Image (cartoon, rainbow, N blue to C red):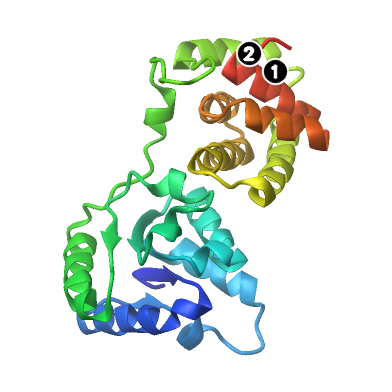
Amino acid sequence: MSDVFISYARADSRIAQRISHALQEYGFTVFLDSSTLVAGEDVQHQITKAISSSSAVIAILSVNSKRSNWVEDELQSALEAEKVIIPVLLDDEGKDNWVWPLISDRIAFRLTDDSSADELVRQLSTLLDSGRAKQPRLVDLMRDKYEVGQVGAIGRNALNKIWQKDAVNLDVSKLAEELMLLRSAMQGEARTAEDFAELGAVASAEIEAKKGNGPTALAALSKTGKWSLAVAEKIGVKVAAAALISAIGIEA
């Protein structure tokens, strides 16, 4: 078991190793794949197990990480396991992915050069020691309020009623499968910050649907818009499209 799992793109390995070494000097155990993976064993299994057994995940986000499927898979596993995730931003392009909208409300750190790495690690050490890192805030998705620019944001009670009314058509396991397909399709088309925000909402809904949380999945989908629905209809994921229509209040 490790205290910290570090998720990073291979191109950012130098800074990942520096953070790892510094954290170890502070007494933390760290899982860094380049030094911890066991040869001959299934890599994906080792990584999933390491995330599950870690107390926190440090996500190094950069222009490199947004091109890394490994980073996205690791962070999705961390979100599904409801781990504390601490983002470390190396540049602004680290926000241009579907993961950022899901973790942007955590305590985040920005690292612009190697000279600031030592101070960063001191702050990370304090945060990890005190246990003050923010947990996922799904309650924010469930508040009874209207969002500016939303086609039809819906509160918790309304979403529960919608799920109960449409449950026969919105099979949660099928919804999870189709949201995964939708996320993949949207990921290939996302260009703007608004696109990535919708993509993050779909990913959040996918995670909740996998847990069997239908109303909470709808709550996440209420933060999407017409683009998500257009992609869903284009690729033919009918259950996901129906959920989107219910969540954002568009007439079928």
Query: Residue 42 in the image: x percent, y percent?
Result: 67, 78
Of 209 and 98, the residue lying toward us: 98
Q: Is residue 59 left or right of residue 192?
A: left
Query: Residue 209 in the image: x percent, y percent?
Result: 62, 36
Of 67 and 161, the residue lying toward us: 67
Question: Is residue 171 in sight in this rendering?
Answer: no
**Residue name at image x 31 percent, y 78 percent:** 19
Count neighbours of disc 2 (C-alpha within 10 A) and say few if under 14, some if 14 to 19, many if 20 or more: few
Q: Is residue 139 left or right of residue 213?
A: left
In what element is the residue under mark 2?
A: helix
Residue of label 2: 164
Query: Residue 35 in the image: x percent, y percent?
Result: 46, 87
Q: Are marks 2 and 1 in contact (CB under 8 Å)?
A: yes
Residue 1, which numbered label? none
In what element is the residue under mark 1?
A: loop
Residue 167, which numbered label? 1
**Residue name at image x 68 percent, y 39 percent:** 179
**Residue name at image x 27 percent, y 76 percent:** 113
Give the amino acid at mark 2.
Gln
The N terminus sits in image quarter: bottom left
Give the amino acid at mark 1.
Ala
Quadrant of res 61: bottom left
Quadrant of res 180: top right
**Residue name at image x 36 percent, y 69 percent:** 4
Query: Residue 217 in the image: x percent, y percent?
Result: 57, 30
